[in-house]
Image (cartoon, helix red, strand yellow):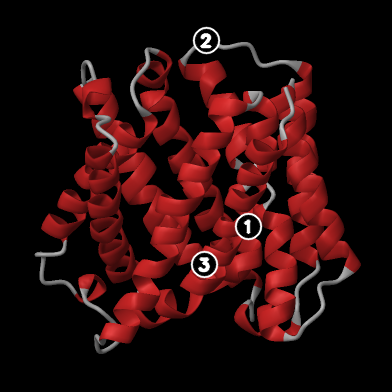
Amino acid sequence: MFTVIPALAAVSASFGWASGIVLAQRPARELGAFEFTRIQLIACAALMSGLASALGLWPGLHSIDVPAYTVSVIAGVLLGNLAMIACLRHGGPRLTELLLCLKAPLVAMMAYLWLGETLSLSDMVGGAVVIGGIIMAIQATTPEESQQHRSAKTLWKVVLLGTAAAACQGGGFLAVKPMLEQGAEPIAVAAIRLTGAAVLISLIGLWPAGIMRSQAEGSPYLLFRTVLPGIIGYGVSSSLLLYAFAYMEAGLAAVLGSLSPIFVLPILWRTTKQRPTPKAVSGAVLAVVGTAIIVLT
């Protein structure tokens, strides 16, 4: 069933994620992947826990599958976010959003291998379309991106980080999927996942290694610029998408909530004054179409 307000909510969620990843690029580069992720996870864990408490959603967690949550926290949240932020620092928002489109075909493959779900022809076609769109869009680099990817080695690093982020985040979702299907409240599940990851990354941060340290001097403004994308992503966009899932057909809501690779292009055009090339637009559209083929069928 198509209704206007839930559809607008899903589209707004896509726009929020696209805006958030553009806003996150500079503070992520200044702080480093680890410190940026640590601050975001702590802030967003507090946000989602407060939201779950305010809405009285904790009773929706009838039981907790500890092994599944452990996998979801370590792979889906901690490693997935670290890989995504590292990809953002080296590849920029456009390539990061594109590579995260691999989540749909990777989840379909993992569900086939781990959960025994059927891998249909449409899944394989959709996956091929996603990969084709990503390859096309990667070839359409802007001058700024060309400067970042000074060698093929750097570009391959970006691709591997983005693929790892998509795989980890998709695997983390699959780990808690059975609990969600049994009626667990999504916001409460998200709060527990984020809290677990925040505790874990804080403990890891006690290790006195250079990679764990901030690469920039802290300031209230830098803290604000670090937390804001997380609030937009975890707080606003996730809540909008959950609203869309509740009031419209889930597959269509998922597609409308996956438009960020397209939305990020005009946002970057506005912020960098560099018009996206036709190949970049076509590749982003193909990646979203491939996701739609997988989700809707």
Query: Which image quadrant is residue 70 in?
Result: top left
Q: Are marks 1 and 3 in contact (CB under 8 Å)?
A: no
User: Is residue 179 shown above or below 232?
Assistant: above
The residue at which mark 3 appears reads as: 88
- Asked which secondary structure carries label 3, the reply is helix
Q: Position of residue 165 (x, y in %)?
A: 48, 49
Q: Residues within 10 Å of mark 1 (few under 14, many from 20)?
A: many
Q: Are marks 1 and 2 in contact (CB under 8 Å)?
A: no
* Extreme residue in the right direction: 278
The residue lying toward the viewer, choosing from 166 and 252, is 252
In which quadrant will I find the N terminus? top right
- Give the residue drawn at x 53%, y 65%: 21
Amino acid of disc 2: Gly
The residue at which mark 1 appears reads as: 15
- What number is the disc on residue 191? none
The residue lying toward the viewer, choosing from 89 and 64, is 64
Which mark is in front, 1 or 2?
1
Ranked by sequence position, the earlier of labels 1 and 2 is 1
The residue at which mark 2 appears reads as: 116
Q: Position of residue 96 (x, y in %)?
A: 59, 60
